[in-house]
Amino acid sequence: MPTKNDVAWETLFSQHNILSEIEQNGIYNISSTTVNTAREARLMAKFDKLSELPKIFRDNNLTILSISRGSYVIGKFNNYYKIKTDDDEPDIVDKDLPLGIETIQPNNIYSESAALLCAFNARIIEDLFDEPVAPTIGGRMKSGIFNFKIQSGSALPEISVKNAQIEIDGGFEGDSRVLLFEAKKYGVTNFLIRQLYYPYRCWVPRTKKPIVPIFMSYSNDIFSFYIFKFEDDELYNSLKLIGRKRYRIAPEEIGIDDIVRVLEEAEASPMSGDVPFPQADYFPRILDLIELIKGEGKQKQPNLTARYKFATRQTQYYTSAAECYGLVKREYIRGEGVFYDLTNDGIKILGLTRRQRNLEIAKRVLQQPIFAKSLRLYFEQGEPVSKDQIAEIMKREGVKDVDSFKTINRRAQSVKSALRWIMELQRA
C-alpha cells in the first residue's frame, strides 16, 4: 500500500511538474513551505536509507538533499553509500568496560549515543587509531556555508548549502585528529552520505587537525566501524573507505567445542509448509528485530518497516526467518492488520544469559537440515561453504525453486550469513 509520503510526493510532483523540470534543468529546488502544503516537511524529506525513499523517487532514480533550514534540492544524485557484508569482514576484537561502571550495560544499549558512550568507555574509540581521545562534539548545529559538486548521472551539478541543520552523534578529539561519528543501533547496508559529508564540511575550517568521518553500527552485540576519508573536499561522492574494525564487549566465552556440541544436539525440525525458506541475507538483523519486540512488545508490520528502515518486502523476509527459527509468531487481527510477537520459546531464549541465548539461537538455526549440513561441510573442508555448494545441498534436500538463480542466490546468502554469525560466536 502507498505510504503517506508516497501520496504526498505524488501530489507535489504533479502540481509542480517536478519531473519535467528535472529533465530540463537537472535539479529541482523546493521549499519546506511548499512541501508543507502536502505534508509536514520534517516527515517528508529525511531518508537515511535507500529503501525509505518514496515510490516516485525510486521509480525515477531521484533523491533529495536539504540545503538550508527551509529548502531542498531534488535530482538524480548518487546520494547513498552501499556497505558490503561479506566473508572478508575483519576479526572481532574483545574489550572490557572499566570495573565499577553500572549505568552502561552492553546488553541494554538503548540509543546511538549510548552505543558510542559504551564504545568510548571500553576504550574502543581510542583503539581505532591507537590514540587517546576526548568527547568534544555532539548534537544539533548549523552546517555553515559551503558549495560542493555531486554526481548526478554523467553531470556534476554544483549545490550551495547555507546553514542546513546537521546532527553529530559523537565527535572525539585526539592529539593528531578529530573523529566525527554517524551511528546506528542496527545493522545497515547503505547510508546517506550527507550524514558524514555535511558535518565534515562544517568542521574542516574550524580545526587544523584532520577530520576523520566514521560510520558506526551496533548490532548483535557487535560494534562495526567504517573509517572513511573524502578524497576531494568539494566532491560529495569522493567518500573512500580506508578501514574497517569490529569490536564487542567481553562476552561470555564460546568455543568451537560449544558450536560442535550445538550442531550435534540440534534435532532436525524442517520448517512447515506455510513458512517460506529464510531469505534474510544479513542474519544480525533478525536479532535486532527480536530484541525490538522484546523491549517494546508486539509490533505491527508497518512499525517494523519504519523502525528498521526496511522495504516492506525486507520486513517480510526477516519476520519470516524469525518465524522459521521459532522465535516469532505472526498474528492477524481483523481491522488492525498483521502483528508480530515473540513465541513462548522466543521469550525464554531472550531471558537467558548472552552466552546461553546465542547458543540456543544457533541450535534453532541448525535444526533446519540445510543449515546443519552446510555447517558440517564447513567443518569437513576447513573453510566457509560457497553459494554453489549450498545450492547443491538444497537440491538434494528437495527445496523448491532451486533453479531460479535470483531465489537460490538469496537463500544461499541467508545460509552463509547465518553460518558466519554462528562461527563468530567464538571469542577472537
Image (cartoon, grey):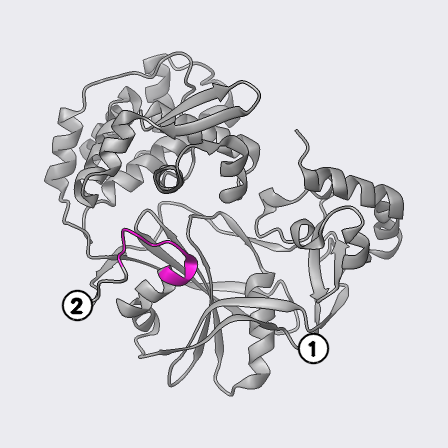
Position of the N terminus, as image quadrant, is top right
Which of the 4 image quarters holds residue 79?
bottom right
Left or right of 362, for residue 188: right
- Which type of secondary structure does the marked residue at label 2 adopt? loop
| Residue 10 at x, y percent in the picture | 78, 40
Left or right of 144, for residue 110: left
Q: Given the current orientation, which residue lies at the most extreme bottom position?
A: 208
Mark number displayed over residue 100? 2
213 relative to 347, above or below: below
| Residue 390 at x, y percent in the picture | 35, 26
389 relative to 154, above or below: above
Q: Tell which of 72 and 372 is nearer to you.
A: 72
Mark number displayed over residue 145? 1
Which of the 4 image quarters holds residue 376?
top left
| Residue 325 at x, y percent in the picture | 32, 26
| Residue lying at 77% horizontally and 52% vertically, measured from the top left | 36
Q: Tell which of 243 and 250 is nearer to you.
A: 250
| Residue 191 at x, y percent in the picture | 54, 53
- Say if residue 31 shows up in the picture: no
Residue type at tag 2? Gly
The magenta stretch spans residue 108:
yes
The residue segment tinted magenta is 105-114
